Every structure is written in C-alpha cells, then in structure tokens.
Amino acid sequence: MKEDTPPIITQGALSKTELGDDLCNFCPLEKKGVYSVDGGYVAGCEGSKCHDAYDNFLSTIGDMNEFETQIILKLRELRILDEVQLIVGEYERACTKHPTWPDDIIHGAAIVAEEAGETIRAAINAAYEGGDIREVSHEATQTAATCIRLIKHVDAPFKPSTINSLKEWMA
C-alpha cells in the first residue's frame, strides 16, 4: 500500500466486502461476469482476479487526497455514489454537446427550469399515461447536471446588453 494512502483507507474503511460489486470496476479482466461464446456461455472471472482488483482500487485511492477520499466515502455511506456518477457523466456529456453557457444568470436559470419541467413531464407520463418510470430518473439526472452548470457560472459577468433588454422587456 502506498505511503500517501489516506488513513481512512488504511483503517479498513473500504474492504473488498464493502466495495461489493463496485470492486469489478477495478478488475484487470476485459470480460467480466457471464458472457456468450460460440457454443454456449462462459463465466468471465468467478472471483479469480478480486485480489488484483482490490490492489488496483487501493492504488487509485492512494492517488487521491484525504478530502477527495472523504467525499467518496460519504457518497457511499449515503448510498448515492452511483447516482452522483450518473450526474457527472451527464454533466460531461452536456458540456461536450453544449460547450457554451449563457452569459447571464436569468438565462442559465431558465435552462435549469426547462430541464426541471421535462422531469415533471416525465413524472406525469409515468404516473398517468403509462410512461417509463426510468425516464423520470433520466430527466432528473439531466436537471442535476444543469444545476451544477448554473452553480459554476453564478459569478460569471453579466452582459449589459442582456440586462438592458430584460429591463426593457419587463417595463
């Protein structure tokens, strides 16, 4: 184990058992679980590389500072790590698809409201029209990612022309 591994890890905060199926994310095998091959199916690992996976996990954690490690541990404790990973993935996708963000807080907040409206629409569809409940989660994930983008841009300078046109519109 690395010298700079945070104390929480060395105290056994995340054992193989506590990692559970997340340990597979650190497995060196290309194919994991059961997969098809010509003539049938093969079990990819049956736990044969869990020790290597755990070593990989520890080396990854060892590269993080204590604060980063504490955040991950807290997310795991709250049982929201998977959801946060989805939000981060959506944030990255959105930033790639829409690299620019509005220059003013009002338009940024409007984008968040639009995403929240899509979440409400998905919930109504799921509750009353037989829509897929997973769409609610998908839309909520997009809303959360958009909220992060807004928060990151709250201190962005306003364009005077945008503010003036809004003042005129409201008059």
Image (spheres, rainbow, N blue to C red):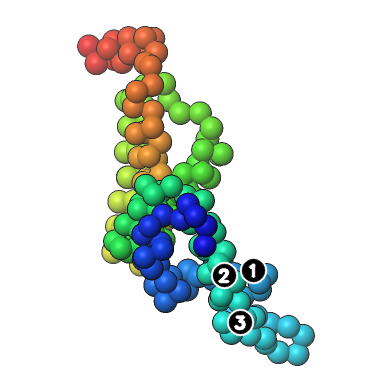
Residue under the image location 38 percent in, 32 percent down: 152
Q: Callout 3: helix, strand or loop?
A: loop
- Residue 8 position by quadrant: bottom left
Pick the quarter of the image with the C terminus. top left
Q: Upstream in the sequence, badge 3 or badge 1?
A: 1
Residue 100: x %, y % from top left: 51, 28
Q: Which residue is tagged 2? A: 53
Q: Which residue is tagged 1? A: 28
Tell me which amino acid carries mark 1: Pro
Residue under the image location 35 percent in, 52 percent down: 71
As drawn, the residue found furthest toward the right would be 38
Q: Upstream in the sequence, badge 1 or badge 2?
A: 1
Instruction: Give the answer, above or below, for where 78 lies relative to 49.
Output: above
Residue under the image location 61 percent in, 82 percent down: 48
Q: Callout 1: helix, strand or loop?
A: loop
Q: Residues within 10 Å of mark 1 (few under 14, many from 20)?
A: few
Instruction: Give the answer, above or below, for where 32 lies relative to 55.
Output: below
Q: Residues within 10 Å of mark 3 (few under 14, many from 20)?
A: few
Q: Which mark is residue 155?
A: none
Q: Which mark is residue 48?
A: 3
- Residue 154 position by quadrant: top left
In the picture, measured across the screen, residue 133 lies left or right of residue 89, that is left
Query: Toward the viewer: 58 or 153?
Result: 58
Instruction: Give the answer, above or below, for where 95 lies relative to 165.
Output: below
Tell me which amino acid carries mark 2: Ala
Residue 124: x %, y % from top left: 29, 57
Q: Residues within 10 Å of mark 2 (few under 14, many from 20)?
A: many
Mark 3 vs mark 2, CA separation in Å: 10 Å
